[in-house]
Amino acid sequence: MSTQDTPQSVISPQPQAEHLDALVIGAGVAGLYQLHRLREMGLKVRAYETGSGVGGTWYWNRYPGARFDSQAEIYQYWFSEELYKSWQPSERFPAQPETERWLNHVADTLDLKKDIQFGTRIASAHFDEAADLWRITTAAGETITAQYLLACCGMLSAPIVDRFPGQSSFKGEVLITGLWPKEPVDLKGKRVAVVGTGATGIQVIQTIAPEVGSMKVFVRTPQYIIPMQNPKYSAQDWQKWGERFHETKQRVRSTFAGFDYDFDAGPWDEKTPEERTAILERNWNDGSLALWLASFPEMFFDEAVSEEVSKFVRAKMRDRLQHRADLCELLIPQDYGFGTHRVPLENKYLEVFLQPNVEGVDCRKAPIERIVPEGIQTADGKVHEVDVIILALGFDAGSGALSRIDIRGRGGRSLKEQWSREIRSSMGLQVHGYPNLFTTGAPLAPSAALCNMTTCLQQQVDWITDCIAYARKHGKQVVEATQDFEDAWVQHHDETAAATLVVKTDSWYMGSNVEGKPRRLISYIGGVGNYNRQCDELASKGYPGFAMR
């Protein structure tokens, strides 16, 4: 039996019911910072976390190869220069164990764990209109009341688990990447199937390839990739980054995607073909997400530019696949443009398919039909016999974590039911009809995707905290986004999204990976800097659009 905590297996302590000024759901990047900020205000606040430790994404996703794809120098907290300098990353893109240790270092430095209740899943939260407070219940039956409910549940924290018929019949071991066991998993010499080739699947595949006996990779949607450049960091390297703390802090808040690089090359039309290629080569060789988020923004809007950039990446991929026609057809995208899906960084992922013990299974030609006791059965009737099935199926992104809690607002309205019809929010900070519920990483903000997460999550926590402080200063007990404000934001969000090629593709960005999920770009694509300016303007004007009483 796995020792990994899961929501179904959690047994919580049963302290006496009490009232909090604020309750924070989650102890990941956002939850830790939100707890810290509200404690600074002097509020009585506690965070509730399903897992047995802090880290959020970096607690649950301990699958082989899990690591950053934001550089360590920018995947940071920015409220303390001292904290920034107190932890030295070992490399540019640290792996999961190091990142989990770093977040524990943050929690310990700020003495946060004393105000976190671990092993506790929030099951429901109902707004009591007569008392103007939230009545919250844990999975173990504990009840808490709170004036403010801060949902820091994470953007990618609701893993897709039960996708295939017959999954429970498999005689071997089924492993979910987003719920990976804490104890070591021995894959040496085993016949392994990996289902899913998104960013997570790619990390798993390239990592376990040297040790498995054989591996079958079930490919439905091939991905454009960028090869990761991951140098080690010395104390001297980190000292240099420490000296740039304030400069980098300001930079990430103003760029398109919250990184320290941006679209600075100039317009595509003003460049010669040679100049364009040189810019693409430079960003490709940087070994980061710069090719995607700092070369030419026209790739998101102009189909001709998108095709040229896509051709550039396809050629790179064909060379690495030794121009094998079968592998190029299986692994190189042709029906969507580079950057309209999440772009993974990788390390010799493509070369894995050149190994004699690795087979790619084309799920476009023969989709997975069911899981049987011996392995995976595809639509062509073939049974692929394996010992272990690894499911890297992704997440119900943006909305899933909140939808899995029974959240009910004014008049008993259900957030899950609302979002099953239409996913909407007020800048990803509140949802009309749910007073004093604030959200981070929620739909229709750049923090749902398309952003260096630490940049966007901290910005949202700061805005939320300042909004609560403003309300308290003015003697207001309740804050709620108005219907008119939310309608206007949804319209702006959709108009901004409609101008891009992203909405023309099927990906988790559009909710296409979850059956029945309403189609809408989950992340605001107007740019982090632009979003932050709009948030700052609202705050400076006294939060118009957010009714207070």
Image: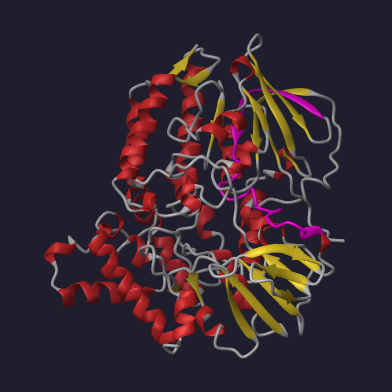
Q: Is residue 1 above or below residue 35?
A: below
- Residue toward you, 166 or 57: 166
Q: Is residue 314 magenta?
A: no
Q: In the figure, is residue 476 to the left or right of 125?
A: left
- Residue 239, given in percent of the width and then of the height, sits at 45, 67
Q: Is residue 192 above or below residue 445?
A: below
Q: Is residue 300 above or below residue 447?
A: below
- Residue 264, given in percent of the width and then of the height, sits at 24, 60
Q: Looking at the image, which residue is at 44% across and 90% down?
A: 322
Q: Is residue 146 magenta?
A: yes
Q: Evaluate whether residue 476 shows in this view.
A: yes
Q: Looking at the image, which residue is at 67% across and 27% down?
A: 44
Q: Looking at the image, which residue is at 59% across and 57% down?
A: 394
Q: Looking at the image, which residue is at 60% across and 35% down?
A: 151
Q: In the figure, is residue 261 to the left or right of 483?
A: left
- Residue 98, given in percent of the width and then of the height, sits at 63, 65
Q: Quadrant of residue 112?
A: top right
* The magenta segment: 142-168
Q: Evaluate whether residue 78 shows in this view.
A: no
Q: Is residue 293 above or below residue 310?
A: above
Q: In the figure, is residue 50 to the left or right of 460?
A: right
Report the number of numbered marks.
0
